[in-house]
Amino acid sequence: MDHYEKFYSRVAKSIQASEIRELLAIIKQRQDVISLAGGVPDPRTFPTDYLAKITYDIIKNKGAYALQYSETKGILEVREMLSEFLYKARGIVVDAEDIIITTGSQQGLDLIARALIDPGDVVITENPSYLAALGAFKIRGAELVGIKIDKNGMRTDVLEDTVKKLVKEGKKIKFIYTIPVAQNPAGTTMPPERKKHLIEIANQYDILILEDDPYSYFVFDDTVDIRPVKTWDTEDRVIYMSTISKILAPGLRIGWIAAPKMLTRKLELVKQYMDLHTPTLNQYIVAEAIRSGFILEHANKISPIYKEKRDAMLRAIKDYFPENVWYTEPVGGFFVFVYVNKPGFDTKKLMKVALDKYKVAYVPGKSFHTDGSGANSMRLSFSFPPPEVIEEGIRRLAEMIKNE
């Protein structure tokens, strides 16, 4: 019996462990298992020498500021750098005063959920969607409504019909959450016409859009339009989020929110009571990486590494998977999403079999779905293993799909 049960809050009592975090802890102890589970960057892409040098220089030359408390929204110099960076890199026009630097993008999701969601409010997401975002919204009491995806991401025709229905029922829709480029977990990318349609729906029904953009720096096809939804935002209703976790290093825990002007102050006030401010030293490190031009150069340098891994996974899937499998073919990012069309095939129930018998790991897909579906799905990540290991992992997975 848990003697502390009576002390727990309703949130603590209801919260469930992240399947991904729990699974990664298990895999870490299993050196014999090929992991296609965690969407973690390849550590060979970390610019350790560069980061060591600029960290030393910052502490030596700016130590009095870099090691001190700082403003809740983020250091002004860093926000100004980010404002310029977002315009040059993504075509987003945002004043430095409307940027909030967060402790990773996960804090950004939590911060927005705290500021906008009351129990019973509706949040619309893609189905499937990013597991940790769904968790952040559910903790605040949101009613999640998922919109089906196809190979081009969220089906905005289904979104429009769903919004009409929810409005007719008197539901309070707070925002639509989307990862339009190289989506997690599906790897899909929305074409411009769907992004524009998404904006039109939000404008018509007075809904906010939360755009999460961690992967657009790794798009392997130059012909793909990766402009953010925010660039079509004429009514200031898109909240844009991103992070340096994939393009520089996740351990720095730096993300940012480019918010509509009237929301910025409220988000800042909520953040004051969460962590006072994001680590000052890490903000300076990121500012220097942006100022010197290193961050985009580095992203362009390491993108081919991930393309090679993506190609290896798709090639292996084509070679080994049976015909009863549907999978996405991402133009970027870290993930391929798979549905196995086989009666009774449950990827969560088969996880132990996968680990013990086939020595391969994936993330079961059901938790990414808002409606309890997806028991026959799984997320596969190509970001961490080398190409030859990816191929062997897919071969093992194909054996499991055929045999179990």
Image (spheres, rainbow, N blue to C red):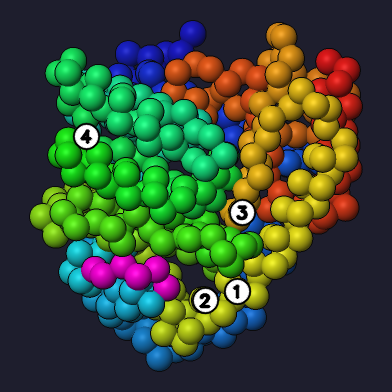
Residue at the disc numbered 1? 300
Is 37 positioned to the left or the right of 61 in the image? right
Q: Secondary structure at mark 3?
A: loop
Q: Quadrant of residue 287?
A: bottom left
Helix, strand or loop at mark 4? strand
Side of 151 relative to 234 (left or right) = right
**What kind of residue is marked 4?**
Lys
**Residue range corresponding to the magenta coloring:** 89-94
Residue 174: which disc? 4
Residue placed most toward the observer, 393 or 1: 393
Q: Is residue 209 magenta?
A: no
Q: Nearer the viewer, mark 2 or mark 3?
A: 3
Q: Secondary structure at mark 2?
A: helix
**Label 2 with label 1: CB-CB less than 8 Å:** yes
Disc count in the image?
4
The answer to whether the residue labelled 3 contacts the one labelled 1, judged by CB atoms less than 8 Å apart, is no
Q: Would you call the spot at circle 1 few (<14 residues within 10 Å), some (14-19), or many (20 or more)?
A: some
Give 69 or 393, whichever is nearer the viewer: 393
| Sequence-wise first label, 2 or 3 | 2
Q: Which residue is mark 3?
A: 331
Residue at 18%, 69% in the rendered image = 97
Left or right, 394 with respect to 110, comes to: right
What residue would you read off at disc 2?
A: 296
- Name which quarter of the figure residue 10 lies in: top left
Q: Position of residue 194 (x, y in %)?
A: 39, 45
- Which percent across, then down, holds residue 364? 64, 27
Of circles 3 and 1, which is in front?
3
- Tell me which label, 3 or 4, sits earlier in the chain: 4
Front residue of this view, candidates 157 and 170:
157
Q: In the image, what residue occupies the spot 21% across and 30% down?
A: 173
At which x and y percent is residue 190?
Answer: 47, 48
